[in-house]
Structure formats: C-alpha cells, structure tokens
C-alpha cells in the first residue's frame, strides 16, 4: 500500500484541480450576474449596543470588530426589514456616538467612536432606508469555516458548521442539529459530553457513557456511536472503526454539535443515527486567564489553567495554553486520573487569512472496578429474570452482588490511554469570491489495559416454539469464575483536508457551492492476553488476588491492520424567491482500502489469516426547505452514509439511509427555537440468521442480509423563554428494531428531558442563577438476543427468533445547580441525582448491568486573573 508521503504529489494535484474548477465556476457566475443584493432580514430591537450588536452578528452572519467597553450603555435604534448588512448597521447606529466602518478591500465591518465635530450648522439627519429596502452597495460575503462567537441566548446559538464544514444558520439547515454551547457545559459542570448532550432529543446513554466511560460513547436515534470528529478531523481509527478510549477533556471544548441521522459530508462512514463534531477552543486576541478548581465527592479533584491572548503588539499572533490534572474518586470503586495539555497558536496574516496550530496531549487512566466498563456492574442471575421480565433496580442480596461494590473486579484493574494530536488549519480567500481551508492532522493513540473481572454469565434455555428464555443455568454466587486480561493497542494516523466554498448571486438566486476532499491513512496493532484467576466470592467484598505472572497468560487475539480512506464531496445550497426556498444537494464518494492480518491464538506460529477489503461508495444528501415566514422553516431531507465491512470474506458496504421531515421556528429575535422532526432510518446489509436454513440447510445459506430500522419523532425547545429563563426541553418517541422485530440492548422507545435555568439580571441577586433538570429514559432491553445453544444462532431449532431474556425498567433522574459571579470569580455548584435514586442503567448483558451513580456534589470555582 503506498505511504502517505508517496501520495502527497497526487493529493496536491487533486487540490489544484479542485481549485481550478471552483475558480472557473466563480468566473462564470460573476459574468452571469448584474449585481448582488447581499440583503438579509433584520429584526433588531432598541437597546444597549452590547446586546444589540451581538444580535446583529447573529442575524447578519458578519463578523464585527468592536470594543465591548466602548459600546456598553449606548442605546441603538431598532431595525426591521431587509437590508444590506452595512446599511442596517449604519441605520442601527444613527444618532449615537458610534459609527460603522467597512474595509474597502475585504468588506470587514467594525464599530468605532465618531470623531469629535467642530461647531457647524446643524444638519438634517439622513432619512432611514425604507422598510425592506436595500443599499446600492453590493458586498460579497464569503462563507466562514468557523462558528460565530455570539449567541442570542446562552443555550441557543443561531449557527452550526457540522452539516458541511461551513457556518450556516440552523433555521436554514434541513437537518436536526443539537448544539452544546460552552455556557451549557459550564452550567452543568460537564465531566463528559454526555452530561450536557443528554438534555437534547434523540440522545441517550450508550454502554460506557459518562466521565468514567469510554470514547464519549452515546446513542443517537438508537444507534450506538463509537467515534466523533474533532475540529472536523475524524477520530475514527480506520480500519478498526473505533474511536479513542479516553473521554475527550471538556475543558478543551468550545462547543459540540450532533448531526442526527447519516452525516453525508462530515462523517460519511459514521453511525447512521448521528455523528458528533467537537469544536475546540482556539487562541483569542483579547487576553483572558482562568484558574479553575473542582471539588466534590465523585468525578472531581481537578485543577485547570486556561490562558489566551495576543503575543505581539501588532495583533498578528495569539496563543492559548490549557492544562489540567485530575485525581478523583468514582462512584463505582476506583478513580479517574488524567493529565491534559493543549498548546495553540494563531497567526493572522489579514482579515481573511489565518493559520492556527493546535496540539492536544491526553494521558487518561481509570483504576479499580471503574476501569472495567461494561463489566463492573452486577450479573443478572435470578430465576425471576426470564420470559422478558423487568429486573429490579438493585441486585438481590442472595446473588452476592452489591449496587456499588467491587462485584468481582480486581483492585489492580486499570486502563490507560495516551493520545497525541497535532493539527494545523489555514483559511484564506481567493479572488474575493472563494473561501478555502487547508488542514492536516497527525494522531497517535496508545491504549493499555490490565484488568480482572467475572468471565462467565448464566446460560439461557429457550422455548423452541416462542423463542422466550424459559430457564437459566444457575451460578454459585460464592465462587464466580474470573479472568485476567491484558490488552495493548496502538494506532498512528495522518489526515489531510482541503475545502472550498463561495457565495454567488446570479439574478435572484443565491448559490453557495462547497467542494472538498479528505485523505486519511492509519495503521493499528492490537493484542490481547488472558489468564484464569481464582474464583471470586462477592460476599467477601473486595476481590484482591495476586496479579498473574506474564508467563501465565495465553494469547487471546493478535492483529495488525492498515488502511487508507479518500473522500471527495460536493454540496450546493441554492436560495430562490427572496430566500424563501432553499434547495440542498450533495454527493460524497468514499474510497477505502483495508488490510488486516489476524493471528490464530491456538497456533501463534501459523501464518496469519488475511482479510483484504477495498472499494468505493457514493453517498447522497438532498433536501428542500421552505420558509412561509422569516422565522419558520418547513423541510424534507434524504441523507445517506456507508461503512465498509465484510460478508463471507468479501467486501460489503453497510449503508445508513434516512428520510427526515420537520419544522423549525425561532422567536424573540432568535432567542428561542422550536423544532419538530419525523425520521425514518434504515441500516442495510446486516448479516442475519436465515430461518429457512434450519428447515432446509442444503438449499439455503445460514445467513442472509437484511436491514435494521428505526422511526420516530422528536420535539425540541431550546433558548430563552424570557430574558431571565433559558430552557432545553425535548421529547423523543421512536421504535428501533432489528430484522426480526426485536428490541436492541439499551435503546429506549421514549426519552424526555428538561433543563430550566433562571438567571437574575438586576437587584440584590444580580449575577446569580440556578437550574433544575430532569432526564427520563424509557424501558430498555437488557441484552441483545442471545444464541440458542443448540443452533449457535439467534434462532431456535424451529426457526423462531430468540428473544431478550430480561429488560431494565424506565428511570428518571433529577439534577440541580447554581452559579454566582462575584468580581472576577465564578462559583458553580452542581448536584447530580438530587434524590440519590438507585436504578440499573447501561445494561451490557447478563454479565453486567451498571448502577447509576448516587448523589454527586461538585463545586467548581473559576478565577479570572
């Protein structure tokens, strides 16, 4: 397989060809148009410039430069109607001590103080432009590859970037996108992204969710997600199709966006239920320094330093340094320990050209029972857990397990992950028509695990006529079989991206084409060793057998994989009829080549088995959005993605397909947004047991290919109900089923969430806020359908699909918190699981059902210096 270095000339040639094509398109569009309108709809109230300028930025999509101290207290005029942004800004600042300035070359906007005037005859103020009017000036506004920094409400940003790598209004995006802002992460004291994302629709906990989990794992519309993108770079470690084990440090994150459904452009090989894109913090040209302490009973013990600001007096260089250390106790016996650092620099060459370099170093470790995600709960062994029964929320005393105990996990268990990420991004403008982005990343992950835990779960007996579990083989609760496991995996990866975007306005049509390519190459080594441990007696509490010597371990598996992936995509947005109709169309072609060598653990000296997969797949995105009013959108979207796997040792593409219908609306100057969506998702080409094989094995294959489906609806309200109340409220109803109509493990049919935050803006309680939250998760299957011991497949001897043996009850958890700002300090108190409720969640199988953490209290102090 050619190396990344050998392919660079070819990649450069592809970039040049892409650039030529887009420049030609720009020249043709310029020749076809007479003038550009550049108009946008504005609904700006009378008010303090500190607030109304932020609203102007949100509504115009422009970046405006101004000093907050200079504009605070200035009362601006209301603006209603469609204007050129510069004209709207001029009218907004009329009769104030401020004026608008626009750079002649770049079109950049700024707000400055008016020059002192000598005494002269009074002049008549210029007449305001007529409602809906426009300026004669036509300014080209280039698409941005970054997100806007201002928000109409702390929980509701007006824009997102994860649909196509460029910034776009959420109201004009025909997809469901959830955004966790920095303010939300701070308010809930997030130690993982799940703690913030859980309040949004379509999001539920995966196996191993939360700060002591793995990979920031969550379920999106029922499909478990194993990966995420970080600053548009995939953390999916091809060809293993897994993400880094470590939870990405929340203090590195500026915001996180989840695109629900297949993400054709940003994550063409990801989960069909959705994908998460993390936007990290970046260097700022205004100085800011923070020292943050987190104290509490669980998931605390953290100190963070975050410093940013300009480097030189000319304002060309800016830096950011973030560092933190943590050694905190976890609810399941054990601890979370980590050391994280990020060093960043930005060089601003002009208003349209900048280069940003970022390094992230993560050293993350879980110890004790907490290190064994999906194996640190209690086993489901009781006779009353058959025939689809709903188990109790705590283990029975006779089983030997306890709700928050060691449960057969060794005290010396630990998992360690060392991650190094170095990335660079150059953004600039070409010919005043095109924005371009060139970005590269190198990535290294070293994961080590050394653990001991129970290894055998009770066997199930099925009724051949119904497929129901009718009996389980009991285990001796005082003598549990145990296994010691060592695993080591290393991955090295390089990624290169190039994107181009432009705005054209031929006639009455607005066009925004985006094209780009992405190249990713990776290599992975992994090995697992296993050894038998002495039987465990959970009744005795702590299980602390000696760690076996290395000579006692046997090879479990060993493999080496290498792969490359190349994606080329194109997407166009077209606005018609005064921006009331938006058509979106996109296509992505992904080429994958993967080679895996798998060693036989029973015969390590034998030549490895080789699996060679290669091919390409086209995925598509198409949608239509209609705006009957300026603040209401009706839309339909069809989107797909695909991942390369194998069937009978041959390449096979599993494809995700989604139809989504919805309505979006925004109120109160974009402060509050409401969305209702209906979705239908199918994941195709899943290998499924063939019922006909049991009847006639001669003429039928043992497995066939079929689809897994989910359909449902979501309601979402996010933003400011009033100037003092911010809210996130959501409801999800869905039906996720496998090809035999069975429920999948850990996927509920119902989700409901509420978060209310009241912040005082005046009086004695000014700068104080408090919030209350509730999360409801419906009943879930505790296990996927297990194999019948006779046929070794999920069908009985009569060809009846086997059923999950047990279910986990629906649960609700309540959270609360408060924040107070005093001078340069911010105090944040978080109380999770306010009522100290005990219930099962995150079921992995009969081998382990995890406890929900009990009452958790954390106090975070942020000192700005």
Image: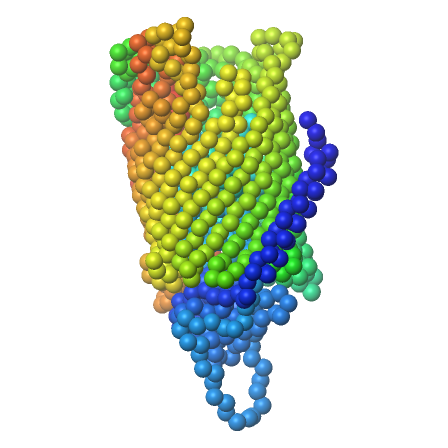
Percent x, y of residue 749: 31, 34
Total of numbered circles in the picture? 0
Q: Quadrant of residue 721?
A: bottom left
The reply, left or right, for residue 111 in relation to residue 760 is right
* Res 472 seen here: no
Q: Residue at x 68, y 26 (%)?
A: 1
The reply, left or right, for residue 446 in relation to residue 62 is right
Q: Quadrant of residue 14?
A: top right
Q: Residue at x 62, y 31 (%)?
A: 564
Q: Residue at x 48, y 59 (%)?
A: 509
Instruction: Point out the residue furthest to the front here.
Output: 32
* Res 752 seen here: yes
The reply, left or right, for residue 635 in relation to residue 652 is left
Percent x, y of residue 807: 30, 25
Percent x, y of residue 331: 42, 33
Instruction: Point out the residue furthest to the top here.
Output: 698
> In this orientation, which residue lies closer to the viewer: 776 or 13?
13
Quadrant of the image for the C terminus? bottom right
> In this orientation, which residue lies closer to the viewer: 108 or 493?
108
Q: Residue at x 52, y 94 (%)?
A: 121
Percent x, y of residue 716: 34, 48
The reply, left or right, for residue 303 in relation to residue 849 is right
């Amino acid at each position: 397989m050619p190396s990344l270095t050998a392919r660079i000339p070819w990649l450069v040639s592809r970039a040049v060809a892409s650039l030529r094509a887009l420049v030609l398109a720009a020249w043709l569009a310029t020749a076809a148009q007479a003038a550009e309108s550049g108009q946008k709809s504005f609904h700006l109230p009378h008010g303090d410039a500190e607030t109304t300028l932020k609203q102007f930025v949100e509504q115009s999509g422009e970046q405006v430069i101004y000093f907050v101290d200079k504009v605070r207290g200035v009362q601006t005029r209301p603006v209603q109607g469609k204007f050129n942004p510069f004209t709207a800004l001029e009218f907004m600042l009329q009769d104030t001590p401020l004026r608008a300035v626009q750079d002649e070359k770049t079109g950049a906007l700024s707000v400055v103080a008016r020059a002192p005037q000598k005494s002269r005859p009074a002049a008549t103020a210029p007449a305001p432009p007529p409602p809906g009017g426009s300026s004669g000036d036509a300014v080209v506004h280039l698409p941005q590859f970054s997100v806007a920094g201002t928000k109409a409400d702390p929980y509701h940003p007006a824009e997102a970037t994860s649909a196509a790598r460029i910034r776009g209004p959420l109201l004009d995006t025909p997809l469901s996108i959830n955004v966790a802002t920095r303010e939300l992460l701070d308010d809930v004291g997030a130690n993982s992204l799940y703690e913030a994302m859980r309040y949004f629709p379509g999001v539920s906990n995966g196996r191993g969710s939360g700060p002591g989990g793995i990979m920031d794992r969550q379920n999106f519309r029922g499909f478990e997600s194993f990966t995420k993108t970080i600053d548009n770079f995939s953390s999916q470690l091809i060809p293993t199709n897994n993400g880094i084990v470590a939870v990405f440090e929340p203090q590195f994150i500026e915001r996180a966006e989840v695109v629900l459904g297949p993400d054709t452009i940003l994550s063409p090989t990801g989960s069909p239920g959705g994908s998460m894109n993390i936007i990290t913090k970046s260097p700022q040209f205004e100085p800011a320094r923070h020292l943050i302490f987190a104290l509490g009973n669980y998931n605390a013990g953290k100190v963070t330093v975050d410093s940013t600001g300009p480097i030189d007096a000319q304002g060309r260089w800016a830096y950011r340094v973030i560092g933190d250390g943590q050694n905190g106790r976890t609810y399941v016996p054990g601890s979370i320990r980590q050391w994280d650092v990020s060093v960043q620099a930005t060089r601003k060459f002009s208003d349209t050209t900048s280069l940003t370099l970022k390094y992230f170093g993560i050293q993350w470790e879980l110890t004790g029972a907490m290190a064994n995600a999906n194996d640190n709960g209690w086993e489901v062994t009781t006779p009353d857990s058959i025939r689809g029964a709903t188990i109790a929320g705590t283990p029975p005393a006779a089983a030997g397990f306890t709700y928050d105990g060691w449960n057969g996990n060794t005290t010396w268990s630990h998992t360690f992950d060392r991650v190094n990420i170095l990335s660079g991004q150059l953004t600039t403008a070409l010919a005043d028509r095109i924005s371009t982005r060139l970005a590269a990343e190198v990535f290294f992950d070293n994961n080590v695990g050394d653990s001991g835990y129970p290894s055998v779960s009770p066997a199930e007996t099925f009724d051949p006529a119904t497929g129901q579990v009718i009996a389980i083989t009991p285990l001796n609760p005082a003598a549990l079989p145990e296994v010691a496991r060592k695993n080591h995996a290393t991955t090295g990866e390089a990624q290169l991206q190039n994107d181009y975007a432009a705005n054209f306005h031929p006639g009455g049509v607005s066009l925004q084409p985006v094209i780009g390519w992405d190249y990713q190459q990776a290599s992975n080594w992994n090995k697992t060793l296993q050894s038998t441990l002495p039987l465990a007696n959970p009744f005795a509490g702590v299980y602390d057998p000696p760690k076996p010597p290395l000579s006692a371990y046997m090879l479990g598996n060993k493999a080496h994989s290498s792969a490359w992936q190349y994606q080329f995509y194109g997407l166009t947005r077209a606005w018609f009829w005064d921006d009331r109709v938006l058509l979106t169309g996109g296509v992505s072609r992904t080429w994958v080549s993967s080679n895996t060598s798998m060693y036989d653990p029973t015969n390590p000296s034998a030549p490895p088995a080789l699996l060679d997969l290669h091919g390409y797949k086209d995925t598509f995105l198409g949608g239509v959005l209609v705006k009957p009013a300026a603040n209401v959108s009706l839309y339909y979207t069809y989107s797909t993605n695909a991942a390369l796997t194998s069937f009978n040792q041959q390449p096979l593409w599993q494809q995700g397909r989604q139809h989504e219908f919805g309505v979006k609306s925004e109120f109160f100057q974009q402060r509050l947004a409401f969305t209702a969506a209906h979705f239908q998702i199918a994941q195709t080409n899943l290998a499924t047991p063939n019922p006909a094989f049991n009847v006639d094995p001669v003429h039928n294959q043992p497995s066939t290919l079929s689809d897994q489906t989910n359909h449902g609806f979501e309601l979402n309200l996010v933003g400011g109900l009033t100037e003092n109340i911010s809210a996130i409220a959501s409801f999800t109803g869905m039906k996720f089923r496998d090809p035999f109509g069975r429920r999948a493990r850990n996927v509920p049919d119902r989700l409901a969430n509420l978060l209310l935050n009241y912040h005082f803006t005046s009086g004695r309680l000014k700068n104080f806020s408090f919030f209350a939250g509730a999360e409801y998760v419906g009943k879930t299957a505790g296990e996927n359908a297990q194999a019948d011991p006779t046929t070794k497949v999920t069908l009985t001897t009569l060809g009846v699909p086997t059923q999950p043996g047990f279910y986990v009850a629906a649960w609700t958890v309540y959270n609360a918190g408060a924040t107070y700002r005093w001078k340069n300090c911010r105090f944040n108190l978080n109380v999770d699981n306010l009522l100290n409720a005990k219930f099962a969640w995150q079921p992995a199988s009969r081998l382990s059902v995890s406890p929900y953490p009990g009452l958790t209290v954390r106090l975070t102090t942020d000192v700005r210096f």
